[in-house]
Image (cartoon, rainbow, N blue to C red):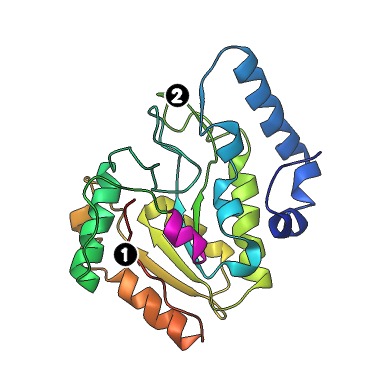
Amino acid sequence: MDVKIEPSWKEVLKNEFTKPYFLEIVTVLKTEKLAGKTIYPPGPLIFNAFNQTPFDKVKVVILGQDPYHNPGQAHGLSFSVPAGTKPPPSLVNIFKEIRTDLDIPMPQEYGNLTHWAEQGVLLLNAMLTVRANEPASHAKIGWMNFTDAVIQKISDQKSGVVFLLWGKFAQDKQVLIDETKHHVLRAAHPSPFSVEKGFYGCKHFSKTNELLTGEGFEPIDWKLLTP
């Protein structure tokens, strides 16, 4: 089937698109849309993380769980929201940690992380779609088979990638990563329910840049320039 995804990813993942689980994902999404269900993000943005960060450019992975399920929030990048949408609580807390860690100003009303993605930060959700107002509604339709394969391909075919695993859900993916050739940074999830349990003070953003520099990569400019 012809999946519209950035060419380098299409090549790396070509075997996944013909597997039964992926065909089931397509069937579920088509069936729900025909039934009048609203699905986020919009179709052209389902693979936005891949289109913004080609496989050969990936040097950091930030793993989220589920796309935002409220109108106007999800645009295919984990934790990110489009320009014009107020940053949700977890993203607000991420910005607070960046301010503390790197002493750089972060926006209050802007949460589009495309600037990170363009520099090689793969903003990957474990599930790539969700029904409107129903969190985790697509958790069992097959997406995790796909995104587990994505993590595995990065682990197998690249080296020196920094994986940021926030919260238990993300940390359970650690088994897919070869830590003899990649870096894994773990912390509590930045949500208001757990941010005080080890996300604040984790310094993952300065640590990521130190690790990237050590690998000979350009560090990430975490500052967001608002339009």
Pick out the residue farthest to the top: 35
**Residue at (53, 41) in percent of width and height:** 127
Confirm whether residue 193 shows in the render.
yes
Quadrant where the N terminus sits is: top right
Q: Which comes sooner in the sequence, label 2 or label 1?
A: 2
Q: Is residue 163 magenta?
A: no
Determine crowd level at label 1: few under 14, some 14-19, many 20+ residues with C-alpha closer than 10 A: some
| Mark number, residue 223 | 1
Please, what secondary structure does the residue beneath circle 2 have?
loop
Placement of 147 over or under 43, stated as above or below:
below
Which segment did they paint magenta? 114-121
> What residue type is disc 1 on?
Lys
Determine crowd level at label 2: few under 14, some 14-19, many 20+ residues with C-alpha closer than 10 A: some
| Mark number, residue 132 | 2
Left or right of 202? Residue 75 is: right
Can you give x and y, in whole percent of width and height, for residue 24 in the image?
71, 31
Q: Main secondary structure of the magenta part?
A: helix
> What residue type is disc 2 on?
Ala
Please, what secondary structure does the residue beneath circle 1 have?
loop
